[in-house]
Amino acid sequence: MLYPLVFEPLFKERIWGGRELERLYAKKLPAARPIGESWEITDRPGDASVIANGPLAGQDLRWLMANHAAEILGGAQPAAAGRFPLLCKILDAREKLSLQVHPPASQAAALKGEPKTEMWYIAGAAPDACLYVGLQRGVSRADFEQKISDGTVADCFHCLPVKAGDAMFLPSGRVHAIGAGLVIFEIQQNSDTTYRVFDWNRVGLDGRPRDLHVPQSLASIDFNDFEPKLVPAFYRAAAGFKFRQLVEDPLFSVQEFVFEKSGFVKLAGQYLRIIAVTQGAAKISDDGSGVVAELKSGDFCLIPAVLKNVEIKAAAATSLLCTEPS
């Protein structure tokens, strides 16, 4: 009964958000609100993605995991409480996000949080856009704590200029912030734990300063993580497209496929996969279900592991991300 699944996005208002998701991807955003996040595939408490296509339209991902987990996951492992292992978003940062960190697995339970490793793919960037990722070489924990106290902790962060097509891997424990003027596809562990170190002295949507989590941050930060680099832009050629490995991690892997002209790729084996169209358009089909998922730029599709002979047909000038949870 399963097939390539497309979901309704869940929109999140954020003080640093904007309206780019409406302009770029024709997302039907709530009126006159700064939308910073579109949760495209989520199985969080109170935030379960609702199926938008095919015979199961109206059911949600929580129902799927409760009733069809083995068919969805195959050999992939669920998150805590049997939830879907990943959370997939598109972010619209019109202003800088807070300087922050997510707890590593070794510290998360003690801090009463969840570990969060993630990957960013830059889909759109203003000319002067940057990421704050990792520490400037030589910064010590003592330096970091001193600069928190005097309000200059941003000086400790490694700043990288970025453009569309760049990608960055962020293991839990890596301090980071998204700069202003960026649209980002984010693939992450199913977690919503963030510890803020510094929030640029601004106020939240309620007009009050947002909470900081300095003790938790200091317990989570990898103080040996100096000046990480972007994912190399090294592509391999295949029949009708090129591809590169963006992430190869015990939690998940991500590849990018780029089609300069229309073509197709057949996905080998039966695995849980998530396809995201960052540019262009694609159709996803399989042997047996009879349902074809038609995707445009900004759309995601969940391919259950049970499906056989999955094929992606891409239009010219199309780029895709293909994620496989471990």
Image (cartoon, grey):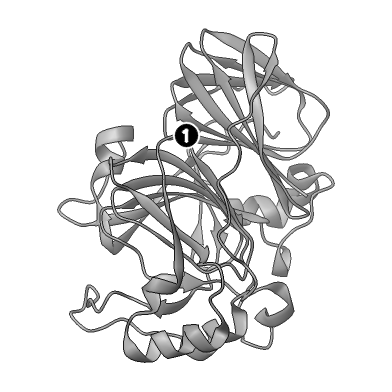
Residue lying at the far left of the rendered structure: 32
- Between 78 and 238, which is closer to the camera in this rendering? 238
Is 22 situated left or right of 211 in this image? left
Q: How many marks?
A: 1
Q: Is residue 28 visible?
A: no
The percent position of residue 201, horizontal first and vertical second, equals 25, 79
Disc 1: which residue: 165
Is 86 situated left or right of 33 in this image? right
Name the residue: 70% across, 57% down: 66
Answer few, some or many: residues within 10 Å of disc 1's Cα (few below 14, many 20 plus, some between 14 and 19): some
Is 162 situated left or right of 277 in this image? left
Q: Secondary structure at mark 1?
A: loop
- Between 17 and 302, which is closer to the camera in this rendering? 17
Which amino acid type corresponds to the residue marked 1 in the rendered image?
Answer: Gly
- Between 286 and 205, which is closer to the camera in this rendering? 205
The percent position of residue 73, horizontal first and vertical second, equals 76, 47
Name the residue: 59% across, 9% down: 263
The percent position of residue 67, horizontal first and vertical second, equals 72, 52
Is 37 situated left or right of 222 in this image? left
Q: Quadrant of residue 255?
A: top right
Q: Quadrant of the N terminus?
A: top right
Query: Where is 159 relative to 294, above or below?
Result: below
Query: Where is 315 relative to 268, above or below?
Result: above
The percent position of residue 200, horizontal first and vertical second, equals 28, 74
